[in-house]
Amino acid sequence: MRDVEKTSMKNDKNDRRNRRRGRGRVLYGLLIVLLAAGLIVTLSMTVLFNIESIEVTGDAKMYKAEEIAQATGISAGDNMLRVDLEKAEQRALDNLINVEEISIKRKFPNTLLIDVKKCVPTYNIKYEFGVLVTSQTGKIIENSMNPQEGLVTISGFDAKEPVAGKWIYSEDARDTKILNAFMKLINEGNLEYPIISVDMTKANNIIVNLDNRFQFDMGNWEEIDYKISFAQSVISEHPADKEGYLTMIGNNQVSFRNKADVERGPQTTEAPTEVPTEMPGSTPSVLPSTQIQTSTQAPSDLPVQ
């Protein structure tokens, strides 16, 4: 006889039922996880992590901690996760004239940390209605009629929106670029002979006072770092009591006129003096061997004060 295979309908039904139950348990577990996660997020955004204390550090002693905290727009009781720290920082910078930098951080579970850095008066920027005293980064601290002593003076900058608490800028993007380039160079503090003043009234004929001894006509505003570095190397070739006029000629020459010789008249001459064949960080193809050229003609510009 032929063997007969028997199939149990009961077993097939049980298997399908078990599979459905297994899928149901997975979906049920996933639902529980989602509900729990939602509950945690809701509690975190409402009940948990609410600010209980605000700690203020830094050197802006002209403001009380309460004033700084209030300037951010953040208050005790606000939820830490819902606070937009970037907007709070910008709000504080706009409200606190003498604060140049601010950093706000969360310290869980319920503390907000605020660190501030005060503005240091660095520049007198003259414009048509007076003087804007600014910080290192160009934040306007004061709009005045009189410059502060001991600050670098910038003239010839057409300031737009000259309001205390704002960062200085010009509608002319070129002027803003020139100003930022000089600020960066000065702020780095690597100049052996400091920049005392900059006259950028004419972008193609910028005049720089170096160390209150040399007036440098650097020509146009291109390659500011290179030209100032070149002038510094020329100054280093002269005695500490020497004063005079430097003029950039092309891209690789600087002429020197001795102030004392110019004041005595055209009868005095001085032999040319060599400058280094290479500037620091340059190559001979960029800066070939050059000479300081001397002249006895009186300069058209004013002597260094």
Image (cartoon, helix red, strand yellow):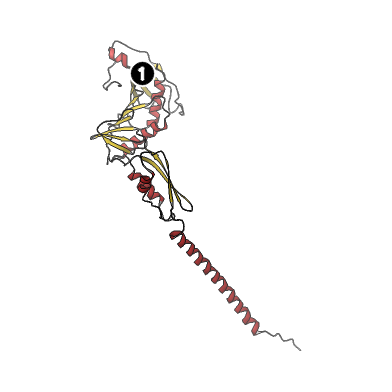
- Which image quarter is the N terminus in? bottom right
Q: Position of residue 240 (x, y in %)?
A: 39, 17
Q: Position of residue 164 (x, y in %)?
A: 29, 40
| Closest to the observer, 86 or 173 | 86
- Numbered disc 1: secondary structure: strand
- Under mark 1, the amino acid is Gln
Work out whether 53 lies above or below 223.
below
- Which image quarter is the C terminus in? top left
| Closest to the observer, 110 or 18 | 110
Residue 232 in the figure: left or right of residue 204? right
Q: Position of residue 100 (x, y in %)?
A: 37, 40
Work out whether 96 lies above or below 121.
below
| Residue beneath disc 1 | 293
Q: Position of residue 262 (x, y in %)?
A: 29, 15
Residue situated furthest top in the rendering:
267
Q: Identify the residue shown where x is 44% and y is 53%.
A: 52
Work out whether 124 lies above or below 211.
below
